[in-house]
Every structure is written in structure tokens, then in C-alpha cells.
Amino acid sequence: MKAIRIFGRNIRDAFKSVFRNFSLSFASISCITITLLVVSIAVILSYNVNNFTRLVEQDVTIVAFLDTKTDEDTAKQYLEKIKSIDGVESVEHQTKIQIAEEMMESSETYNNIMSQWKVDGKWVEDEIPLRPTLLVRATSLSKIDNVADEIEKLDPEKETIKLVQYGEDMVKQLISLFDVIRKISIGVVVALILVTAFLIANTIKITIFSRKREIEIMRLVGASNMNIKIPFVFEGLFLGILGSIIPILVTTYGYVAIFENFNGQIFSPFIRLIAPEPFIYLVSGILLLIGMLVGMFGSLVAVKKHLKI
Amino acid sequence: MDLIRFQKVTKKYKNGVVAVNDIDLAIEKGDFVFVIGQTGCGKSTLIKMLYREERPTSGKIIVGGIDVAKLKNWKVFKIRRKIGVVFQDFKLLPKLNVYENVAFALEIFGLPKSEIYSRVMKVLDLVGLKSKAKQYPTQLSGGEQQRVAIARAIVNEPKLLICDEPTGNLDEDTSMEIMSVLEEINKLGTTIIMVTHDTEIVSKMKKRVILLDAGRILKDYEKGTYVHESN
Ligand SMILES: Nc1ncnc2c1ncn2[C@@H]1O[C@H](COP(=O)(O)OP(=O)(O)O)[C@@H](O)[C@H]1O
Ligand SMILES: [Mg+2]
């Protein structure tokens, strides 16, 4: 009971103090806000880069693009040949029409373009500039390089099999770009956290000075060190919490918007962004935690330096 | 029984000033003692060591069975809760009213509101300021402000009340009012040590008087034996 009352009093004091020096508190809060926004970018990128890497590693699909004019029989022949390669799980032939129809479903723009390849609602196959494909699934990731090589060897002149691609190839470059952004933002975060902690320490220092008399009297009437120090730590904590509100909102709504805009897909149907739920709660939790830690750390620095007892 | 015992206590400040020099002194529980002497003779230093604002350079200081000289810094608050202190400059918080200033000393212990209320009102009654509980320090006379400070010092029911020149800023009549409040508190069982240079008050009160000079006890007058010397 007693502890709860003391705790309540500390919280009330800290809260009052945040608003008593509001212009100063505001500077700290803004700094935390900016820091956490960058933290948010870094966290979202990190998780997604990890996720992409994991997905790419699971993606054992190889796509063999065939010449536009390949006829069904030739495609079937190659399909059988590929099936017999060691390490191939399954092969699927996608005709130009199938591909075109799939694309039409996925977007209105495609829909408009592709309807030009139809006459009286029927596909005119020669008009379709797409390539039929053979979708090959390898039995495991370790086999994928070998299988791709073998497929290329089936048609060394590249008369029919024009291009052999697999997941990793397509995504690798974007992943490495994301990774660079992530590394930069982590560097920026570290710098910003230091600046923020310093600003908070300064805010708390001024609070301490403005309450010198009160602190002196508290000591005189027998307040313990904890009694005196804890309100300042809470004040830092509050600054951290207040500073994390905007970043959490921006992250939550922003990520959902981005996810919906891309329909979750960035590279391929297989390589997706992390679904917003429960991911945004995790990110929000991380932001709140970092805000609180930075706030407390800043105030502890000030308390240690300016509240020698 | 002795509440306080100084044994061979010396205090040398960092700048080399020896403010208290090899003092032996015992004060009985329930006593009322004046400490007098010229400015700079070490009066404040002597009592600061009691509530561990200062630490003696050597010697022992026992207060209520505890050697405060040995007390670790983080434990100082424990003896502060058993000692009330009053200063010449009152040390009130201007933004708090009389009630809040006194309650301040209890709130940090997490007492329930109702208990804080009854204890604060009791001491405000004792110092005669019950009717001014809602007023702010700036609305009060110096004597009233000092009575608020006294109320705050005793609200935690300390065994010992230390006063460092509590009447230093007050006129004669007001000073005597303060003295009668202190007398009252002393009668209720609280030991009082009061530092002052107002020898007139000291002779009127007829208490034990310790006269300091250059950090040493020049004379220790038994109760009622001190007479104002200047005329
Ligand atoms: N914190 C301090 N540092 C150094 N010297 C001090 C300090 N406090 C007091 N003194 C010196 O110690 C001596 C005694 O001071 P004090 O105890 O305040 O005397 P009094 O209260 O009798 O006027 C004085 O010479 C004073 O200058
Ligand atoms: Mg003095």
C-alpha cells in the first residue's frame, strides 16, 4: 500500500514536471520522435530483409522462358527432358494464354493492354508477345544451381530456352539495396539516440536545478535517495513515452498503407512483405521500449551527474 | 539517559579551517539546550554533524544509539526521519500552501491521505496556525513562516529538534512567540538543541547553555545559571 502511494506520488510529480518545463520537454520529445521514426524504418527494413532472405532460400522455383514462337509439342519435349534431370521435383508448362490471363487478373492496366490481343473475345496467339514458360521446382535449394545449369545445357544455342532464372537472382539485388538502407539507418539511429539521450539529460538537469530547494528540503525531512531520484527517472520515461506516440501511429498506418498499396508483393507472388498484423504491434512495442529506455538512460545520466548525495 | 553524545569530535573543513575542535558533550533525552558563541565559532558545524550534513574528521557522535559519523551516505535519510531541523531562513516552498508545506514531509513516506491530514492539522494547531492552513508563505509574517517550518520539522514526531538561529530574522516579540512554541514542543518530550547569538533570549529561557569559542566548549552552564552579560 505504502509503496503504491509513494509510486503514485512519484508518477504525479514526474508528469507535472514534464508540463511545467514544456518548451524544454517539447524539444526532447521531438528529438525522440525523429529518432524513433528512423528506428522504425530500420526495424521494418531489417525484418523484411530477413524475411525476404528466408523466403528466397525457400524458393526453389526455376523459370525457363521459352521463345515466343515455341509450339506446344516442343514445349512438351523440353518439359519431359527437364523432368528427368536429377534434382527436379516437378515441371509445369504455362502457355502464353495462361500467363496473359493471370496477368489480366492481377491489374487493370494489364487488362487494358492485353485485351488488344483478343479478337471477338478470343486470344490471337501470334499477337501475344509474351513468352511461354516452364516452371521448374527443384527438390532442394542446394540442387537449384545445378538444375538451372542442366536446363541451359539442353539448348546451348538458346533457340528455344531463351532464359533461365531463379528466385535468388531476381531478388538478390533489391535485397542488397534494402540492406544498405538498413545499415545506414542503423548508423543514423545510433547517432540520433546519443543526441536524444544528451538532450533528455539536459532537460532533466534543468528540472533538477529548478527543484534544488525542493530537493534540499526533501533530504532534510528524510527522503531516501530513491525517493528523490525516482521522479526524475520517471520524467525521462514519460518523455520517452510521449515521444513514441507519433512514430507508433506513423508506423502502424504507414506500413498498412504500403502493404495494401503493393498488395504485399514486392518482387514476386512468393517474395512478400511481412503481413501488417501482428508485425506492426511488434514494431510499435520496439519503438515504445526504445523510447522508454532512451528516456530513462538520459535521466539517469543527469541524476548521476547532478544529484550527488 | 543521553540522547546525544559527542566523543572527541573534530571537524576540519577541506580548506583547513578547524570548525570544531576535540569536543566532548552529552545531552540528555528531553533536554532543551542552547548553543551560543560568536559568528564562526563552529555552532552550525556542530549541529550539522548531528543530522549528518557534515561528517566529523575524527571522533564519535552517537544519536539515539546510532554512530552518525559512521553512517553510510545512502542511509542518512534514516536518521533524518528522527531529527527535525529548523533554519533562520525557514526553507518553505513558495508554491505550496501552509498545509502542503507541512504535509510535504509526510507524503514522501507514502502515508495515507487521512493520516497525513490528521497529523498535519495536529501540528498546525500546536504552532497556532490551524486557521491559516490554506495561505501561502508569502502571505504570512516571518514569525508565522517560522512556525510553519517548525510544524514541518515536528510533524514526523522526531526525538530531536535542531534549530539553527530560528529567531535570527525576527523581532523580539515574535522571537518570544517562537520560543514559547519551542518550549511547548519540548514539554511534549522532544529534545531541543537551539543555536543562537541572541543572549537575551537565552537568559530569559533559563536552560542549559553551551558556549563555544573557536571550535571548543568554553563553558557549559547548567540549567538556569546563564546570565546575559552585555549589560
Ligand atoms: N562548508 C565549509 N567549508 C569550509 N569552511 C567552512 C564551511 N562551513 C563553515 N566553515 C568555516 O568553519 C567555521 C565555523 O563555521 P560555522 O560552523 O558556520 O560557525 P557559526 O555557525 O558558529 O557561525 C568558520 O570559520 C567558517 O568559515
Ligand atoms: Mg551558523
Image (spheres, coloured by chain):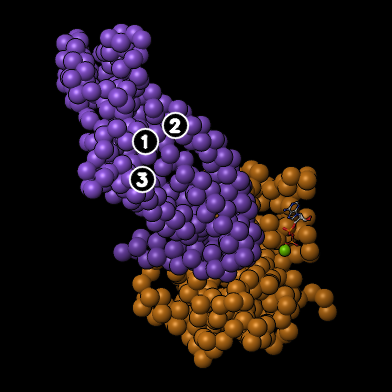
* Disc 2 with disc 1 on a shared chain: yes
Ligand 2 sits in quadrant: bottom right
Question: Residue at horizontal 64%, vertical 43%?
Answer: B58
From where the camera sits, is residue A162 visible? yes
> Chain B appears what colour?
orange
Residue B228 lies, with reference to residue B45, above or below; the image says: below
| Chain to which the residue tagged by mark 3 belongs | A
Decide if ligand 1 comes within 8 Å of the CB at mark 2: no
> Chain A appears what colour?
purple
Instruction: Tell me the residue that label 1 is attached to.
Output: A267
Q: Which three-letter amino acid code belongs to the residue tagged 3? A: Ile
Q: Which three-letter amino acid code belongs to the residue tagged 1? A: Phe
Is A86 in front, or is A197?
A: A86
Question: Residue at horizontal 52%, vertical 86%?
Answer: B134
Decide if ligand 1 comes within 8 Å of the CB at mark 1: no
Residue A219 lies, with reference to residue B183, above or below; the image says: above
Cα separation between marks 3 and 2:
27 Å
Q: Which three-letter amino acid code belongs to the residue tagged 2? A: Leu
Cα separation between marks 3 and 1:
21 Å
Instruction: Tell me the residue that label 2 is attached to.
Output: A174
Q: Position of residue A113 (x, y in %)?
A: 36, 45
Disc assigned to residue B55: none
Whether residue B174 sits left or right of residue A59 in the image: it is: right
